[in-house]
Image (tube, grey):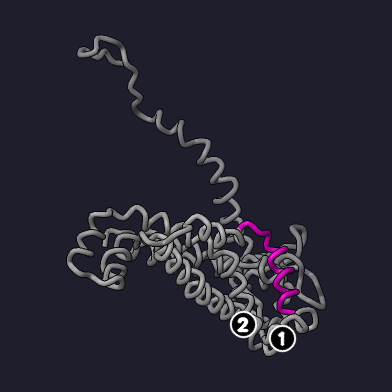
Amino acid sequence: MKLNKQNKHLSVEPSGWYWLLYIIPALLIYIIFMAYPLLDSLRLSFYTGSNSSNREFIGFLNFKKLFTDETLSVRYKGAFSHTIIFFLINMVFQNGLGILFAVIITTRTMKAKSFYQTVIFIPTTFAVLVTGYLWKLLLNPIWAGDTLSKIGLGFLARPWLGTKSTALVVVSLISCWQWMGIPTMMFIAALKNIPKDCLEVASIEGATAWQTFTKIKVPLIKPVIGMVTILTFVNNFNAFDIIFATETVNGAPNYATDLLGTFFYRIGIAGEHPIAIADPGLGAAVATITFIVLLLGVIPMLRYTSGDN
């Protein structure tokens, strides 16, 4: 407690360690629901056994098994490569179209902006299971074939989700369609915060729309682009629900859409067919490697797009 001579009244100024009191609730929530599960998962990756009663310490054998087991390594490498493809498709189409739509909507001459924002964002409000079911119907050649033929699009009546060469791409595009609204709204908000003076100067200097976009808009919204990239990276490497909704947890057809999320579910939670006995230790090893990959990917992205460069 101090006496403020100018205002002639007593004032209380917190000092010392009192500031800790303000972060203790958030710190406890973080430790209980984030830090402890993460550390326990790291610990579990060094054990084998389906439950705590028969769990045995085996060191790095779970990690070795993922890369050397004749069957398991093929499934894991396939799921990892499919996840990378899934992420790249989302980056190009979801975020690419998101920033394109944001630029179009924020132009001065654009009319009915609220309507188009709503149309783009509506799919985001759908439950993933609903989205998956609707697209399974639309892409089913038996159910939609007659309708497509009547409007001259009969060539599109193909088993897109049942063909190995197209299933992963189609599922990725369904994911792009559903979640495109989020990056679009983020880019719109960022573009609206660009000082109008910068854009007016560029217009006076005779800059083209492309030059204004690449030389002014993109550098000024770089932190938002970085955040959207990081969110896409993290979410796609943990993707599970869209595969579950459109295909199966086995990544049908013939593991063509198997991602790290579905692979982890089969190994660590449900158990791999035909034995169907879960191995939490092996599943924890998958989660640990995924966490390391995310960490190695997020840190450079965050540094590059932080806005300080």
For residue 4, above or below residue 100: above
Pair 1/2: label in front: 1
Identify the residue at horizontal 23%, vertical 59% (top origin): 200
The label number, if any, that marks residue 54 in the structure image? none
The label number, if any, that marks residue 78 in the structure image? 2
Q: Residue furthest left?
A: 205
Identify the residue at horizontal 63%, vertical 82% (top origin): 73
Q: Local crowd at mark 1 within 10 Å, few (<14), some, or many (≥20)?
A: some
Which residue is nearer to you in this view: 113 or 99?
113
The label number, if any, that marks residue 157 in the structure image? 1
Name the spot of residue 156 as percent of width and height, x first.
67, 86
Name the spot of residue 302 as percent of width and height, x first.
38, 62
For residue 112, above or below residue 208: above
Q: Quadrant of residue 77?
A: bottom right
Decide if residue 296 is in sight here. Answer: no
User: For the residue marked with disc 1, what is the amino acid?
Assistant: Ala
Name the spot of residue 14 as percent of width and height, x first.
35, 24
Is 98 placed left or right of 190 in the picture? right
User: Which quadrant: the N terminus?
Assistant: top left
Q: Is residue 134 magenta?
A: yes
Q: Local crowd at mark 2 within 10 Å, few (<14), some, or many (≥20)?
A: some
Which residue is nearer to you in this view: 254 or 134?
134
User: For the residue marked with disc 2, what is the amino acid?
Assistant: Gly
Q: Quadrant of residue 297?
A: bottom left
Q: Magenta segment range?
A: 125-140
